[in-house]
């Protein structure tokens, strides 16, 4: 109690010096997000009719592929079984017999999602290509909700709104349900308003077929969706977010599985935005465009600099304040939890998830930030992406 009374007695400058890390990295995200969501309304777009092709590529997704296909409202559906060993190929062929899909491919061995999607892309006839994971189920009208954004001929891709299908399975999935609501449902709305959308999710995204062909399809990258999005942006296409285009996808159900997933995802912060695109933030670069530089800087500041600076801040706190550091960290946690609750109110998080919001705050700061730090350092030092099993060994390092 004495410690918190001491904090309340401090002047603003002293508080700023104590909590410099939070003020530099956390508060700006909340302030920008809350301002955009509160002040900028979204205008409804009139319906647009465009022909569509859906690509569903999966490996060992026999359990989910039928539900996925039955929810797709596209003019053409192409399925690719990427060397499955669980009988998925048989189900895929049966779906073709039943007339639920237009084309099927069963690859004899696993070649990667990238290869599978590029194979199907050559067979697409629709103006808009939907790339959908085999464990993702689209809500009714999801595709129709994404199409109006393509009325603007400069739009090359539309990021769609993902929610968690297996939310009630465990504490880990409930955490991710809150995370998706904040980082996708709200985060992408903010990015869309600022023209800074960095990623069209590979779980459910829409891309103009001519734009896909223009940039050469998907690259052989562990984070192929991020790589594609940045190629589209670099080619001059706009990327939008369609909050009404909703789909539900399965997420890791254990902390171990989640950690392994995020180690792969977070490595993309280095493989995509640093190794491939960081040079474009320089005004001297022939590819420099201010808005694209801001996309890269946004990722670098909030997703790379933040976890790298966190250990420095913790050491600085301990050196200067000793055991009082725990009080300061407790105050930070309370503040961030309060902000997370406010954000959850704005994104209309289901009431059943509100009791888990403190868990979300705790997980983000005690688990996910250290995991991101490990992923970044591992990729910088060991280049783990070149050995990631997401891409089979015989497909790695192939030219894009």
Image (cartoon, helix red, strand yellow):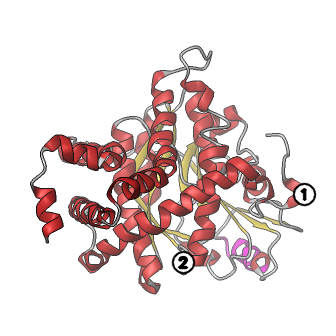
Direction from residue 154 to residue 276 in the image, left or right: right
> Which labelled disc corresponds to residue 394?
1
Mark 1 nearby-residue class (10 Å; few <14, some 14–19, many ≥20): few
Residue 92 painted magenta: yes
**Residue at position x 37%, y 55% from top?**
317
Among the 4 quarters of the image, the one containing residue 131? bottom right
Q: Give the x, y percent position of residue 179.
A: 40, 65
Could you say whether the residue bearing mark 2 is in a helix, strand or loop?
helix
Label 2: few (<14), some or many (≥20) within 10 Å? some
Where are the magenta residues, as a range? 90-99
Q: Nearer the viewer, mark 2 or mark 1?
A: 2
State which quadrant residue 193 falls in: top left
Left or right of residue 349, residue 287 in this image? right
Report which residue position mark 2 lands on: 255
Residue situated in front as seen by the camera: 57 or 164: 164
Q: State whether residue 328 appears in this view.
A: yes
Q: Where is residue 69 drawn, in percent x and y?
A: 59, 70
Q: Is residue 355 left or right of residue 173?
A: left
């Amino acid at each position: 109690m004495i410690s918190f009374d001491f904090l309340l007695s401090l002047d603003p400058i002293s508080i700023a010096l104590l909590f410099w890390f939070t003020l530099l990295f956390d508060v700006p995200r909340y302030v920008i997000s809350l301002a955009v969501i509160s002040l900028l309304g979204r205008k409804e777009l009139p319906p647009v009719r465009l022909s569509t092709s859906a690509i569903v590529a999966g490996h060992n997704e026999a359990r989910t592929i039928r539900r996925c296909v039955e929810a797709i409202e596209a003019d053409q559906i192409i399925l690719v079984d990427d060397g499955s060993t669980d009988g998925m190929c048989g189900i895929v062929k049966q779906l073709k017999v039943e007339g639920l899909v237009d084309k099927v491919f069963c690859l004899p061995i696993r070649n990667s999602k990238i290869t599978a999607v590029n194979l199907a892309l050559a067979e697409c006839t629709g103006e808009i290509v939907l790339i959908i994971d085999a464990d993702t189920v689209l809500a009714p009208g999801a595709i129709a909700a994404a199409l109006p954004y393509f009325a603007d001929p400069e739009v090359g891709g539309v990021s769609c709104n993902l929610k968690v299908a297996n939310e009630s399975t465990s504490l880990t999935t409930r955490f991710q349900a809150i995370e998706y609501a904040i980082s996708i449902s709200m985060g992408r709305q903010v990015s869309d308003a600022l023209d800074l959308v960095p990623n069209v999710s590979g779980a459910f995204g829409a891309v103009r077929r001519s734009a896909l062909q223009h940039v050469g399809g998907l690259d052989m990258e562990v984070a192929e969706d991020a790589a594609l999005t940045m190629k589209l942006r670099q080619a001059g296409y706009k990327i939008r977010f369609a909050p009404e285009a909703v789909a539900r996808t399965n997420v890791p159900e254990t902390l171990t599985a989640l950690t392994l997933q995020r180690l792969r995802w977070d490595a993309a912060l280095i493989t995509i935005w640093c190794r491939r695109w960081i040079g474009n933030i320089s005004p001297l670069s022939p590819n420099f465009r201010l808005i694209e530089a801001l996309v890269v800087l946004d990722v670098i500041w909030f997703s790379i600099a933040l976890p790298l600076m966190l250990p420095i801040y913790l050491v600085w706190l301990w050196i200067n304040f000793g055991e009082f550091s725990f009080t300061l960290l407790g105050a930070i946690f309370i503040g961030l939890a309060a902000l997370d609750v406010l954000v959850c109110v704005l994104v209309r998080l289901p009431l059943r998830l509100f009791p888990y919001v403190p868990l979300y705050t705790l997980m983000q700061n005690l688990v996910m930030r250290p995991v991101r730090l490990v992923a970044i350092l591992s990729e910088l030092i060991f280049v783990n992406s070149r050995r990631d099993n997401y891409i089979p060994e015989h497909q790695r390092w192939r030219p894009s």
